[in-house]
Image: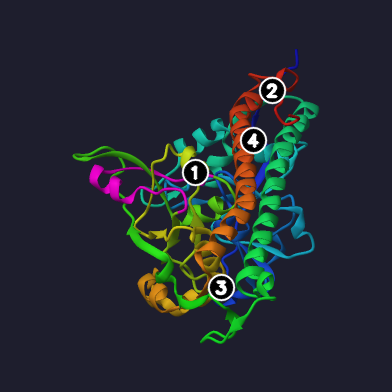
Amino acid sequence: MEEWKEYRLGDLINISSGFAYKGEFIGNGENYLLGMGCVSFRDTFLVSGIRPYSGDAPDRYLAYSGDIVLATRQQSDNLPILGMPAIIPKKYDGHKMIIGANLYKVQNNSDFSNEYIYWLMKSPAYVHHIKSCQTGTTVRMITKANIEDFTFLAPQKETRDKIAQFFWNIENKIELNRRINENLEQQAQALFKSWFVDFEPFKDGKFVDSELGMIPEGWKVGTLSDIIKNTISGDWGKDHPQGNHVRKVFCIRGADIPDIKIGNKGSMPTRFILEKNYQSKVLIDGDVVIEISGGSPTQSTGRVCRISNRLLEKYNNSIICTNFCKAIKPSSGYSSFLYYIWEMLYNQGVMFSYENGTTGIKNLDINGFIQKEQIVIPPISIAADFEKMIKVFYDKIQSNGMESERLAQLRDTLLPKLMSGELKLSEIETELDE
């Protein structure tokens, strides 16, 4: 039987602080600044945590592909990233990556691979250790010494490398599904553009002049309000049953929208709301959810996702949106058309013109947007035909997302068992080859 030895993390790695960067250099330049946004409790690395940086930094603050960085603090229990790792992808080879002030850099001085150390830092034992050491209430923090004092059992190098490779194989399949879904979404957007911007399927028909140029006969110029039945405000309720707030729901936040769009379920928090609010706010298949508060100087409010039966099934048909979002009930047959034209306008930066608020959180004037922004509206029969065609893409995206969720669940189930020696790789009948 293979012997497992006890190790102290600080005997294998050194941890150093990030760079105190200057805000005026953020936003342009060829260098990349890594912030806490690259760290996730679920993903290996989030590209959203990278920003262009025109300043420079000493070599000790630089990172390279395969390096590990750690989050030094956590501002919300809904995003439990304190002490969590991110590993820099190979695609950033050749780029100058500067580690920001709210990250720690891991310098590996052992024969433990960075890949194994990464998965070790995802294990429940490590997470429990970090929680036992954290300080602060509003903002939770962790010290380098706290991380270095973590002790654990591990097998010989050959077994460690096999364990790390097993989890990376799962991660690679999840990443492949993500790339496939991105491609499917691009194809769907291209189909929308072909039909409703370039009018390619209708070129042989008669066209008429309009305020927005030549359009197919039988189409009209209107606003989004012409294809919307009504909008529904969100709710946040209570974090536990309290008084009449007893109806359990899951709340879509702006942060969940990118995941939902690629077929994943997101990380919606559980809340408790009034029964009467549930009846008026619960989402159904075809609804469209809009983020109306948030954004940044370079990202407008107005991010959008579409609700599907498959998503609802994952959450027991009990989804609402938060009060930082709004749900839209499209007119019958126009759900997919509404979603894709909203996405097109968002990508064109149109929403910036409908935002208010100069400091802090920006708000989208959603009523002004849907009542004023002019669009070309197809007849219901054409919108319904598009709905049928786009369903092939959407169903495949959701199917790939469900497979990724299953793989992630397999990974999370096996991680503590393989990292503790409770299970051996040879004992696992992997689902990855099915």
Q: Residues within 10 Å of mark 3 (few under 14, many from 20)?
A: few
Task: Compute the Cα span from label 1 to label 2.
Answer: 49 Å
Query: Of the residues under marks 1 and 2, which one precedes in the sequence?
Result: 2
Q: Do the residues labelled 4 and 2 touch (CB within 8 Å)?
A: no
Classify mark 2: helix, strand or loop.
strand
Span shown in magenta: 265-286
Which quadrant of the structure image shows residue 38? Answer: bottom right
Query: Of the residues under marks 1 and 4, which one precedes in the sequence?
Result: 1
Residue 147 percent location from the top left of the image: 56, 41
Q: Mark 3 sits on what residue? A: 22
> Quick check: can you spot residue 382?
yes
Q: Mark 4 sits on what residue? A: 407
Q: Residues within 10 Å of mark 2 (few under 14, many from 20)?
A: few
Which quadrant of the structure image shows residue 122? Answer: top right
Classify mark 4: helix, strand or loop.
helix
Amino acid on which the number 2 mark rests in the picture: Lys
Query: Of the residues under marks 2 and 3, which one precedes in the sequence?
Result: 2
Classify mark 3: helix, strand or loop.
loop
Amino acid on which the number 1 mark rests in the picture: Asn
Q: Which residue corresponds to the image point at 48% horizontal and 38% vertical from the top-left?
A: 313
Amino acid on which the number 4 mark rests in the picture: Leu
Residue 20 percent location from the top left of the image: 56, 66
Task: Compute the Cα span from label 4 to label 2.
Answer: 30 Å
